[in-house]
Amino acid sequence: MSLTPESLVEIYQRIADERMQDMPFINRALQAEAVGFRAWEEHQVGVLITPWFMNLVLIPGPEEEWRDFSSDKARAWEFPSGSCEFHASRPDGKALHMCASLFTTVEDFPDQQTARDVAEQVMDDLFTPSEDGHSKINEREPSADALLAKPVSRRGLLRQLMLQGD
């Protein structure tokens, strides 16, 4: 069975339900969700939101190319926005996918919609060609150009998104 965005969400929601419930860093306003997944060079790429992190995820296409890719390996891929480094992950011991950390904690996200809005902006940024060849994603600070007049840090972006909801 090959991995899909839906099966990836099921894996992480099961982890949230079975192993993460008592963790203090869990954001109970969030649930596992796949956002913006699209085909890209025989693979699928999108953002995975969980109650404890948000990652850019690459789901492998032809599995034979990935069979021996261990969890300690990393690889960079070129996107229209520039190069982005991903690390291998097998959260259930089987389902290999590649992750690039966007937010190592999601405690500041007030709700699922805000997390989804940020994930959608990340996907827009990923496929927007960079003028200087430097990926905005690699900085792990999604661009807020569509939301704000000037670039900001991740915390600043979240603050602005929260203020927009008021």
Image: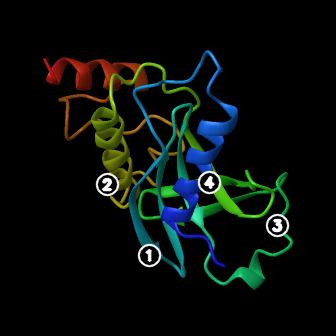
Task: Identify the residue at image location x=49%, y=63%.
Answer: 6
Task: Identify the residue at image location x=82%, y=67%.
Answer: 69
In the image, taking residue 68 as reference, residue 78 lies left or right, namely left
3 or 2: mark nearer the eye: 3
Q: Along the polypeptide, which appears first: circle 1 or circle 3?
A: 1
Q: Along the polypeptide, which appears first: circle 3 or circle 2?
A: 3
Give the Cα distance between marks 4 and 1. Answer: 21 Å
4 or 1: mark nearer the eye: 4
Give the Cα distance between marks 3 and 2. Answer: 28 Å
Query: The residue under label 2 is which amino acid type?
Result: Asp
The image quarter in which residue 31 lies: top left
- Please name the residue that numbered disc 3 is placed on: 69
Query: The residue under label 3 is which amino acid type?
Result: Phe
Query: The residue under label 1 is which amino acid type?
Result: Ala
Give the Cα distance between marks 1 and 2. Answer: 14 Å
In depth, the one of 1 and 128 nearer the eye is: 1
Give the Cα distance between marks 1 and 3. Answer: 21 Å
- Please name the residue that numbered disc 4 is placed on: 11
Label 3: state its secondary structure.
loop
- Please name the residue that numbered disc 1 is placed on: 39
In depth, the one of 164 and 75 nearer the eye is: 164
In depth, the one of 150 and 106 nearer the eye is: 106
Q: Which mark is residue 124?
A: 2
The image quarter in which residue 73 lies: bottom right
Give the Cα distance between marks 3 and 4. Answer: 19 Å
Instruction: Give x and y (percent) for residue 116.
Output: 33, 42
